[in-house]
Image (tube, coloured by chain):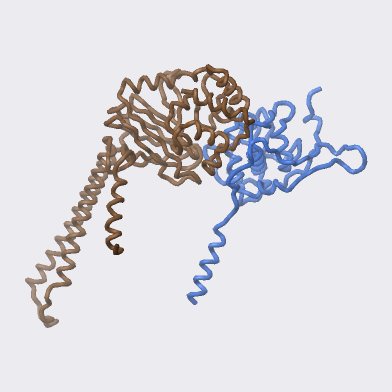
Amino acid sequence: MRPRAGVACVLPLALAGCQGWQSALDPQGPQARSLADIIWVFTGVAVAVWVLVAVALAAALLRRRAEPPDPLSRAPDRERAMGYAVGGCVALTLVVILALTGYSYATQKELFSTHEGRITILLTGHQFWWDVRYEDPAPSRVFSTANEIHIPVGEPVRIKLEASDVIHSFWVPSLLGKQDLIPGRQNLVRLQADRPGVYRGQCAEFCGWQHAHMSLLVVAHPREEFEAWRDAQLASAAPPSTDEQKEGQRVFLSNPCMTCHTVRGTSAGAVAGPDLTHLASRRMLGAGMLPLTRGNLAAWVVDAPGVKPGVHMPSIKLEPHELHPLLAYLEGLK
Amino acid sequence: MRTLAIALVLLSLAACQREERALRGDPMADESREKIALTSLSPGDSGPIEVRTGRGEEYTGNAYHQSEGKKLFKQMNCNGCHANGGGGMGVPLMDDTWIYGGRIENVVQTIREGRPNGMPSFRGKLPDEQIWQLAAYVLSMSRAVPQDVAPSRDDDMHPRPAESRQPAVTGVQGGTVPPSGEAPQ
């Protein structure tokens, strides 16, 4: 295959990346849709301008040239016509640029308008995971989870963005554009999904070794399903039922796990790592790095830095007979 | 001339490696072999036996370890008693008074073993590496570490300038427990 044909075959493949659960060109919410509109309008206008300029340039280069005129002779009509052409083009450029600026400004103003939502989430970025706290006027209805945001479909959700260590950036391409999480200040965004589904988000500001593996999922449910999920998350952890799980809880509480993690309903209440109260109800492990399975969980518990170098969870030395009970306990945290 | 310019540019790349970072710490239960004596009294005339492997310099000379220590200081609620180094229920850490000695091995031992009158033991709760990181950060509060590795930035409101701007002090060798540091009888 000739090189050019090879390139021509491979390039369309890249377009396959424009669909799926993480694509700004496949908007699933009003914010993403207005951003996608901006992308298309700007691209369209820029392409049109480029084509016009290229055509004019080609015409100037290719046209047959007359004899060079006498430098001393003047043709006032011709010069005036040229003046109008250049002036017209400058005016047109100005109009296009001002129109695009105005359009972009109006969209952004709408995009970043902050309002009180029925649901407010405090999203805190850590190296390299997301803490998701559902706020509520009633303190008993506040809870935390990690790396998974659940929202009701068709309802704007207000998200407060904070960071605990370095600057991160929240980006769910299918639902909204990027917004930074900055230590010491709070940014606000609105998140809305029009269709139930799972959307992937990604940290979009380089934040350290595992920046690439700092992702999160946004799960959009119908309203009743969302309320059921929220009530389930509000509950304390299910007490261990089998003997193995009881032993696992003892291992959890007597090892360093409880120095960093919270399991509501037990004496573990630290906030340096993700809240594990309903760990087994989540889809992914290690901020969207691995699917949550028993094998992955075992690898993670025993040797997190081996799975995700640079992660702040140290490797834990467990006795061989302690691992399986601990896994059984963690898997029971539905 | 051009060769010289290219050579100079390549040479400048040598400055890009500021320090080595350990990609993974020691497993949880390992403990460093450091031994320090808290008293100058010992049987015979040899003086107390101490083991300092020089491991501390890995931490006092490393900016990454100290910024990790700064994070842990908050996460492990050290500031609950020591405030941001100014002291409260616990002793101040940003001055140059060290009840149990001001070298990094002494501070590591204090964190790992705990001390009378309130300082809890973190043995088994924190991996050894993180204890060393915390100790290196504690020393940076009084700038007993080089200025270019002391943390230069505060993540949130802080009552004092960042550690790299503290006046430098030399770590107190120390290690003799004064009556105030002894366990109540």
* Chain painted brown: A
Q: Residue furthest right?
A: B44
Residue B80's spot in the image, x, y percent? 61, 29
| Residue sitting at x 73%, y 30% | B115
Instruction: Answer with left or right where residue A200 lies relative to residue B111.
Output: left
Q: Vertically, is A88 above or below A106?
A: below
In depth, the one of A316 and B60 nearer the eye is A316
Query: Which residue, as the protein is rendered here, is positioned at the far left?
Result: A77
Task: Determine if residue A76 is in view.
Answer: yes
Q: Nearer the viewer, residue B66 or B172?
A: B66
- Output the letter for the chain in blue: B
Residue B71, position as x, y percentages in the image: 57, 38
Q: Is residue A230 left or right of residue B16?
A: left
Q: Please state if A276 lies on the left or on the right of B120 as rendered.
A: left
Q: Position of residue A35 (x, y in %)?
A: 27, 42
Q: Inspect this view and state whether residue A72 appears.
A: no
Which quadrant of the figure has residue B176? top right
Residue at image position (41%, 25%) is: A135
Q: Residue at x 35, y 28 (%)?
A: A151
User: Along the horizontal axis of the image, is A109 left or right of B59?
Assistant: left
The percent coordinates of residue A210 (x first, y second) are 49, 44
Image quadrant holding the N terminus of chain A, namely: bottom left
Quarter assignment of residue A192: top left
Is A114 located above or below residue B168 in the figure?
above
> Residue A247 or B36: which is nearer the viewer?
A247
Q: Is residue A58 above or below residue A334?
A: below
Residue A316 sits in which quadrant? top right
Give the total of numbered labels: 0
